[in-house]
Image (tube, coloured by chain):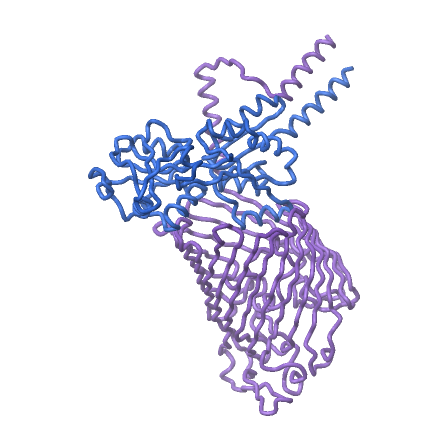
Chain colours: A purple, B blue
Amino acid sequence: MKKLNIKILLILLTLATFGANAQNVTLNDSTFNDLSGRVAKAEGDLTFLKKIKINGWIQAQYQHIDTLGAASVAGGNFQPFSDSRMILRRGRIKFTYEQAYAQYVLQLDVVDPTLTPGTSVGTSSSAIPFAVNVRDFYMKINAPFWNPLTLTVGMQNRPFGFEVSQSSQVRETPERSRFVQSLLPNERDLGAMVTLQAPKTSPLHVFKINAGIFNGPGIAREFDARKDFIGQVTLNSSTKNERIQYGLGVSYYNGSVLQTDSTVYSGIDMTNSATPNFIANKNGSNIGDYAKRTYYGVDAQVSFDHGLGITTLRAEYVAGTQPGVASSSRSSEFAPVGKAYVRNFNAGYFYFIHKIANLPFQLVYKYDVYDPNSKVAGYQINSAGKFGTGDIKYTTNGIGVNYLASANLKFMFYYDMITNETVGISGYNYDKSDNVFTARMQFRF
Amino acid sequence: MKKIILAFTFVAAVFNAAIAQKIKGSDTVLPLAQKEAEVYMKKNKAARITVTGGGSGVGISSLIDNTTDVAMSSRKMKLSEKMKVNDGGVSSAEVVIAFDALAVIVNPANKVDQLTREQLEGIYTGKIKNWNQVGGENTPIVVYGRESSSGTFDFFKEHVLNNKNYAASVMSMPATGAIVQSVSQTKGAIGYVGLAYVENNVKALSVSFNKGKNFVAPSIATAKNKTYPIVRPLYFYYLTSASKIIKPFVDFILSSEGQTIVTKEGFVSLN
């Protein structure tokens, strides 16, 4: 009996190993009907499940900054007595349901909200206040009567520039540029956007037009009566031999921000260029009026496939007018409190990325600059002229290596070298020591 | 003894799994890859190769998603696709396994035997709507093409239509076989398929790429001597990290025996 069992086991294992050969099976009608019914049900279930897509990613990282408690946009300010930390930068999960003419998207982010750049942090020893935030929450409708037209309504990426809408899971650097974090914090906003793009069969498919009306304060509640317009035209194509891929885009933001104070600083008196002054407009009618928020952007991307791998160059330039307060030019997510400062800014970035041929390594260099007040520089920026820390220019050079371990796993080693403009404001009359090293592990599915 | 036998069986199972290969993609390459796999598996009993179609785009997407070992393609991999492969820390290898002559087919009852490139462009862009405009009977032209995920769709657009847009009236078919079937059943129909798909129930037209000076019929011979103008390479793409598993089969296709199968199946061999 024991020998028989061994023989049976061997036969079964051999069949499992080398695959069962065709067998003659007699099926009667009821068996066939039963099986076909089951297959039909399974196919129906599968069709439904194929409409649902779930993906996500988690980023855990170690960071070190030059000075205890330094302010940083590389994942948020450090605690007052800390110059290194382990943090969970992002924990995302995205659900997408697709059917013929519609798409439903919900993306959740598990994050420590105190790490939001610009947020002040206390010394509390309480537990990390992880919060689940909604990042994307929108519906996308393809017009059934005209294929090129799409309407997207809800919380979505603002159609401005390239870096805003580039997912953090594929970005080659830990964070977006300083100006992107300042002008369009959290990237998203609540609004309605139409997209025009010809079908793939058309030569005009390379062009895409986005235009939308948005609240303005990003993922926060709307606090004023005016809506902002954002428009963008992009071109994406490649050469016939598929060796070069390129993209171009122009973007325009036309919005406004509510003023809650009778004093508004806008123009700059340059009569004495050594000691310029922000001109104060003091008028009761300023309260309830609106300051202009206007951005003009241009971006370009090109990738070359050559013997040494694939090299990508990417650049973006933005200029315009940004309302803020004395200490910050960051777009406000709530009704501004205090005197308004309306500044002319310019900003930009440049990326060099090289994926080494046949090796799972990617080399990265990034330069980004944000000058929130392009009319004054250096020691022209001082308290006497009513300037503040919101006028200081920042330049960042970053270098890094990404180890692309698999389709799911990525390791990033990146060093940000940050230079602040030396100005006539206490604490900023020298270049602060705030370079940041980041070692990140990312898993995505 | 029992333990030894079980261990042997387990090792055999693991080995068997290691040499199983999934090949997916171009419907044009499908019959060739199936035949090559069939012969290869007869010679290598341990090999397990499954070949499925779906289109070049589907095959390459599956390679990116890691749900296939080899992507069959009738077009070159796009740089954006290559970059997605690279995102996974791996590189892809490209191998041309054969060439294919793309035949323009009509219903056998159609009296038209030849068309110029310009006439084909007119038909597929919607400017020419009746066969009497190109020397045929007074019959409306029913135009069939492939879906946009197909490499053949891209190739035909690029090389025959000079990158002009397909007319909205062109009926997109999910597979090459569906084009052959539709053309064989519709008197005024026209379509394009790989030469290997041309059967007696459809008629392959001679084409001219020099404004009607001379017309050439599609065949292996005319493709080889380069007189037939609509010829394209057929590709295998696989991850270099999996080359140990894939290469024996690729080497077989590139061997003289594999290339003989290429010719027998109606494709153009490399040599």
- Image quadrant in which the C terminus of chain A is located: top right
Where does the image place residue A195, in percent across and percent down from the top left? 43, 57
Q: Nearer the viewer, residue A401 or B67?
A: A401
Task: Say left or right for A316 vs A197.
Answer: right
Q: Nearer the viewer, residue A56 or A41?
A: A56
> How many labels were placed on the picture?
0
Where does the image place residue A363, in percent across and percent down from the top left? 67, 56
Which residue is at a point 53% across and 35% down the rendered structure image? B97
Residue A332 vs A23, above or below: the answer is below
Which image quarter: residue A352?
A: bottom right
Residue occupying the far bottom of the picture? A271
Where does the image place residue A300, in percent across and percent down from the top left? 53, 63
- Image quadrant in which the N terminus of chain A is located: top right
Residue A260 vs A333, above or below: the answer is below
Which residue is at a point 34% across and 27% down the rendered structure image? B200
Task: Say left or right for B203 vs B58.
Answer: left
Residue occupying the far left of the picture? B138
Where does the image place residue B54, in percent across and percent down from the top left? 47, 36
